[in-house]
Image: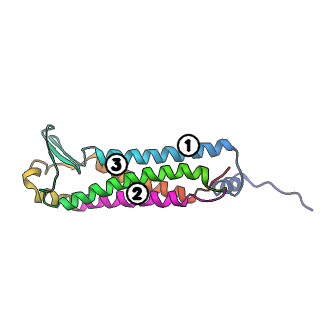
Amino acid sequence: MEPQREPGRGTRLFLWAFNASPRPTVKMLVLLAFIIVFHITSAALLFIATIDNAWWVGEEFFVDIWRVCVNNTNCTEIDDSFQEFSTIQAVQATMILSTILSCIAFLIFVLQLFRLKQGERFVLTSIIQLMACLCVMIAASIYTDRREDIHKNNWRLYSQTSDGTYGYSYILAWVAFAFTFISGLMYLILRKRK
């Protein structure tokens, strides 16, 4: 009878990554901390992108999905008197929904840490996080596609904003899309361990 040969470092790493063999608790805690920080970062990005006033910016103005500010002081709320208001409402609703879904996914993840049986996957958390990802993608895509029409159809308000560029809130929305997508996939792959 031949003695059992211990797997090499690459094989051990592969087995550990797919939870085929137990590893020390410290590594699991580091992985858990990374996942939690990554998820909280995703939620923070969603909050900033949704709330902050910088989807379209220039030297003397800034515009978001809630208001238009010219000369850094003269702000006008976007309301139903706007042309294309339903488009802005769709962006608002999907950004809010993505933020809420991301927060719910985090709470469900914490609950599943205590309730799931060993070896089960965090499928519910993954599904909700991927739904948040879909919502933020829809919001940013609508804004990307319809921004020019919104500005043209509301020329009275947007007349001084034509020389702008996409602002950091818009960019953060796309970064949040990537983060929530990666986070959703991580939860799908992750299995509960001891």
Q: Is residue 169 above or below residue 145?
A: above
The first of marks 2 and 1 along the sequence is: 1
Percent position of residue 176, x then y? 39, 51
Q: Give the magenta part as a residue range.
A: 118-145
User: What residue is pinned by disc 3?
Assistant: 172
Residue farthest right in this picture: 1
Kindly state the secondary structure of the residue where label 3 is placed: helix
Q: Is residue 23 left or right of residue 84?
A: right
**Colour scheme in the image?**
rainbow
**Residue depicted at 14% across the width and 37% down the height:** 73
Task: Say whether marks 2 and 1 touch (CB < 8 Å).
Answer: no
**Residue depicted at 62% across the width and 43% down the height:** 29
Task: Say whether marks 1 and 3 touch (CB < 8 Å).
Answer: no
Kindly state the secondary structure of the residue where label 1 is placed: helix
Percent position of residue 184, x then y? 48, 57
User: What residue is pinned by disc 2?
Assistant: 132
Q: Is residue 71 left or right of residue 106?
A: left
Indicate the amino acid at tag 2: Ala
Tell me if mark 1 has few (under 14), some (14-19) or many (20+) residues whose alpha carbon lies within 10 angstroms of its own.
few
Q: Disc 2 vs disc 1: which is toward the camera?
A: 2
Indicate the amino acid at tag 3: Leu
The first of marks 3 and 2 along the sequence is: 2
User: What residue is pinned by disc 1?
Assistant: 33
Whether residue 168 is visible to the viewer of this picture, yes or no, is no
